[in-house]
Image (cartoon, helix red, strand yellow):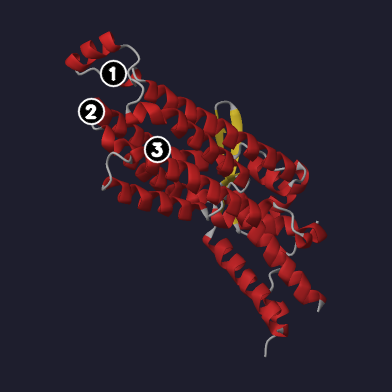
Amino acid sequence: MSNPIENLNKLFDSRVRLGIMSALMVNDEVNFNDLKELLDITDGNLASHIKALEENSILKVEKGFIGRKTNTTYKITKAGEKAFKEHIEALEKMIKGTK
Amino acid sequence: MIEQQQSYQDLQHIKRMMERSSRFISLSGLSGISAGICALVGAFIAYPYVVGTKNYIIDNAAAMEQARAGSYMIIINTWLFWIAAATFMAALLSAFIFTYIKSSREGIPVWGSAARRLLVSVSIPLMVGGIFLFKMMQFGTFGLVAPGCLLFYGLALINASKYTLSEIKYLGFAEILLGIISINFVGYGIYFWAAGFGLLHIIYGIYMWLRYERATPVQQARL
């Protein structure tokens, strides 16, 4: 029997990252401000979490413009989707383990 | 045991974030109730014009001319058009007020990408229906206006249900069902209209309010 904790992805062990991933899973793309509003955190804090996820190819960044304002949007990658689904499954297994 | 609890809370958090980022969840049950009351008041005011105890044409002389010319202006030259327009505006405004109150209480901005998507998805069937019904009225087919309103509104709600609390799709199905039934009772449109836009809204609103907004002891304990 494998220990279900081993299947939990270390990349997703913060609330902010779970929030980012959740939003990316159900939306084709999400921009920085929407994420900031959703998670209610500072720019710097959000940016650092996004950077970590980007470096692990969990999400991809697309920079664009709306008028003159920069509009940065984020999309989940195939690998990111797979990793997050596995993480959710692992969480579910942990709960079932006791019941 | 702590790990299990942590996992459970994480899953709850994921679910909440998924919903919040994709659905406009601040739609208040009170909005449904107030829109329903507006519809009933509108139907009550319109009733004497519909059954013919009051003349629904505003300017008779102009109406003769418009009828001869087949002009769409004849629609605007009726009290019913303005009662309908005022009812719609009143219902929309009152619905917005209660939803605005709910969203500011929850600390969720009323205007975001979820609200935008909701508005777009509800507007498309409504606008198509509006254009279609306007044309039908121009040809004098007034008997199908009430069923048409119910059918297109029902479609709009089902279309929008992906972007708000999903129970609204049952209201959509109910409106469509009522619309289909009313096709067979042309001449009784005002009653079906009042039932669909008045009663069904109020029933839906009360249900949603009881389900999500009335603070039960359990919810209060959680807060």
**Residue B219: where, in percent of width, then height?**
76, 59
Mark 3 is on which residue type?
Leu
Residue at the spot of label 3: B126
SS at circle 1: helix
Quadrant in the picture for residue B58: top left
Residue B200 seen from this side:
yes
Instruction: Report whether mark 1 lies on the same chain as mark 3.
Output: yes
The circle drawn on residue B107 is none
Q: Nearer the viewer, mark 1 or mark 3?
A: 1
Dot 2 or dot 1, earlier in sequence: 1
Mark 3 burial class by Cα count in 10 Å: few <14, some 14-19, many 20+: some
Q: Residue furthest front?
A: B53
**Residue A8: where, in percent of width, then height?**
69, 73
Q: Is residue B6 left or right of residue B145?
A: right
- Closest to the observer: B129 or B148? B148
Mark 2 is on which residue type?
Gly
CA distance for labels 1 and 3? 22 Å
- Closest to the observer: B101 or A36? B101
SS at circle 2: loop
The vertical placement of B173 against B100, above or below, is below
CA distance for labels 2 and 1? 10 Å
Residue at the spot of label 2: B140
Residue at horizontal 64 percent and vertical 70 percent from the top: A87
Q: Residue furthest bottom?
A: A1
Identify the subunit bearing mark 2: B
**Residue B70: where, in percent of width, then height?**
20, 18
- Closest to the observer: B187 or A67? B187
